Image (tube, rainbow, N blue to C red):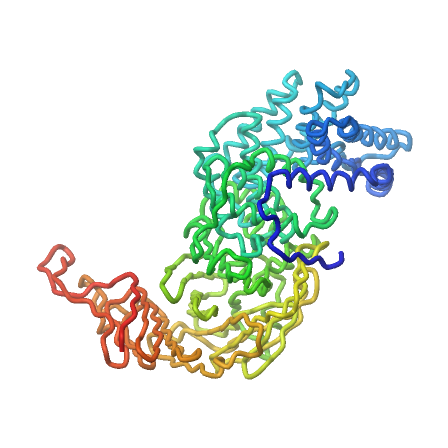
Amino acid sequence: MAATQWEGAGFKRMKRQVYLDYAYSVADLIWRDYDALRSQAIERGKAALRDQGRLQNTFQFVGTVAPAEAVRYKQTGATCYLERAKRYILDVYDVYYALKTYRETENIPIRNADFPTLGWMFEPEPYISAYNSIKDIANFTDEERAQVEAVVERAMRPIERMPEYGPMNRSMLRALNLAAAGSSFPEHGEASKWLKMGRHIFADSLDKWSMEDSGAYQGIWLYSFVAYNEYVPTVNVEDNHVVRHYADLWSRLVTPLGFIPDYGDWDLAEDWVHIAAVMEKCATQYRSPTLKYAVNRFTEAHVGCASGLSGGIDRFLRQLISAHDWSDDALAEQSPAPHSQEACDDTIGKKCVFRNGWDRDSSYLLLNYRDEPATNEIYRKNLTLTIPVKAEKTHHGHNDENALCMLVAQERILLTEGGYRKGAERDCTYRSDYYHNKLVVRKGVTGSHSFFDHVLDFGEYNPVRTERVYFYRFDEVDCSRTRLYDARNAAVCDRIVYYLKREDCFIVNDVVFPQEDGSYTVGPVYHAQEIEPVGERSYVLSQTDISMGQELRYAQPDDVKLHLHFPIDEYDVELQTIDRAYRNQRAVSQFFAGYANGRFPLFFSSVLYPSRQGRPSFFDSFSYQKKSKGVGLQFSIGARCYTIFDRYRYESKIEDLNKRPAYSFEAGREQVFDLETDAYSALTIREDDSTYFCCVDFSTLIYRGRPLFEMEAMEQLQLDFKGPLKRTASWSNWDDRVPM
């Protein structure tokens, strides 16, 4: 589809009618070509019978359009919309019957009749809800009511044969469909079974965290959880901490342009409505002006760049209606705090958002370090041993741990995700680690010592474990350190992100600890539509055409570039064309390929600088020092001289394990350039009249021979409560500006 561009601030004060207006516009597109669509569906169904022996209703989607027409009739009073809704509902049966009759007439043997009327996930509940809303006013005959019941009954059969379970979208959709069927057709002979089965599946999501690390599928799961309670009241959503947690998570992820980065199995323009509905529900329930602000920006972005039926939006008109019904126009909106923060924690969300505001020209970077959780064993094993998901982080997740999912600056998207997946023929495509902006590690090397020749493997999911080491906000800089344990490739990898707020610059340092003696190929990878070298170890990344899915693109001017610089001069750099985000893109990596062991960690540094100008002159000012305990970087931007120190290992601070504290300044002290400290990480900014510093886990910072921070010793209890010793403890973090 032709590129779509959306500029401007969207709706000045969004009203909930926008959801219905959008649903009506989609419904009108379906109705415009309805007779042709119906005929085509019947012909496709006949072909599937002849060629594959499959009896499947290829017109089932109209059941998801019916809710919009039913609501439009109630809002406008125009009977034409009531007639459309009724026709959609009955045509699902009529097309099924036409195909069934054709099969009998042609005496075609059936190989597969699993889905003769509706699918088992997205279609049944919208179909049932539309019928419920008009059954008392649309003059259904007894025969027509029986047809509707037959459609629903046949839609429940595949769920009974393959229920699936666990806190994920596929199971919760089944529970919702069963609840809708059982409560809406209470006289049916299977109703009690449907309701009981729904309760059992629902229980697997009750008070559980999502198994999935995909915004799209988390949204489907949680929307279905909330909607289930409208059929079978079970929990009070207002008091449910899980629902609130995910609404808060998504609100923190909203970018300055309104989108939420499409982490995991997700395309930027698709499957957004479930999230919007849940956020509207929570904003209303909790009377949260910041949630209201976030969902308004989110909805404005998606409605503003919508195009026709792209993204399969016709499947989700029921969810647009829910978003309208759960929204409250009387609730005032208020922008959230304009600073970096975690989203929302270091256990469930496992994401860090770096930002300097919520305006469209604000800067934003998302780091995702969510791994596959160790909980829900029975659910994970049932899933992975039942359906083909070998490429996924169970479930619908990617190998994107410690990846930079999206970077936005100056109203431009400069780093993006790589798409949902290429297709079922190779479902690892777009999900593997090398499709993401992250450090990639492989054991071994190629004969040519090439990076991409070695790492571009088949790409099955590699289970890793991650943890947050720290996340802090300081006056001048926000920073995080997250760790990845990779057993398959025998490496532990730390990613350290510094956001220099005044300079609007990101420094990304990667420390790799080989766990075996042997050959490794390792390095950070960055992707863009175009990547061009612009100097020694410097590259310019251009994005004018952002993929939002297979059908839709987001076009933006080529006036803001992401300038990338690798300060470390001892590694090779390689460029590669790669099929990513449904088209050819470019990838660049600075990498090591050779022999390594745990005694000598590998250190990589990347500078990311958004700019409308040419290559930044401060790239030429970088120098570095590698010491036994860590690495120092130094560079100057204007009159400000920056020094950064990152320690390799916490253990290098240890003096004596039989003492408390076991660490000491003398054991941990390291000097890089003019900075001397025992900090885990430290940063100084020297200006003419002052020096600013911030440190993590430290007792002392000395700069140019002058102590800027120094802890005093005090008596400390010792192991087994022996006599105390006078020793120095550490502060977790501190920053200050000292006159010089």
Dividing the picture into quarters, in which one does residue 48 lie?
Answer: top right
Q: Nearer the viewer, residue 46 or 269?
A: 269
Vertical arrangement, residue 594 with respect to residue 277, above or below: below
Q: Identify whether 373 is placed above or below 675.
A: above
Q: Residue at x 76, y 58 (%)?
A: 2
Q: Is residue 451 above or below residue 93?
A: below
| Apparent side of residue 355 relative to residue 599 in the rendered image (left or right) | right
Q: Is residue 669 visible?
A: no
Residue lying furthest left: 723
Of residues 661 and 216, the one nearer the viewer is 216
Where residue 200 sits: x, y (%)?
Answer: 53, 29
- Compared to 233, does 371 lie above or below? below
Task: Tell me where residue 136 sits by quadrant.
Answer: top right
Which of the image's four quarters has the C terminus?
A: bottom left
**Is residue 563 visible to us here?**
yes
Q: Position of residue 108 (x, y in %)?
A: 87, 34
Asked if residue 112 lies left or right of residue 442, the reply is right
In the drawing, does residue 82 fall left or right of residue 355? right
Location of the N terminus (image quadrant): bottom right
Whole-percent x and y of residue 624? 41, 81
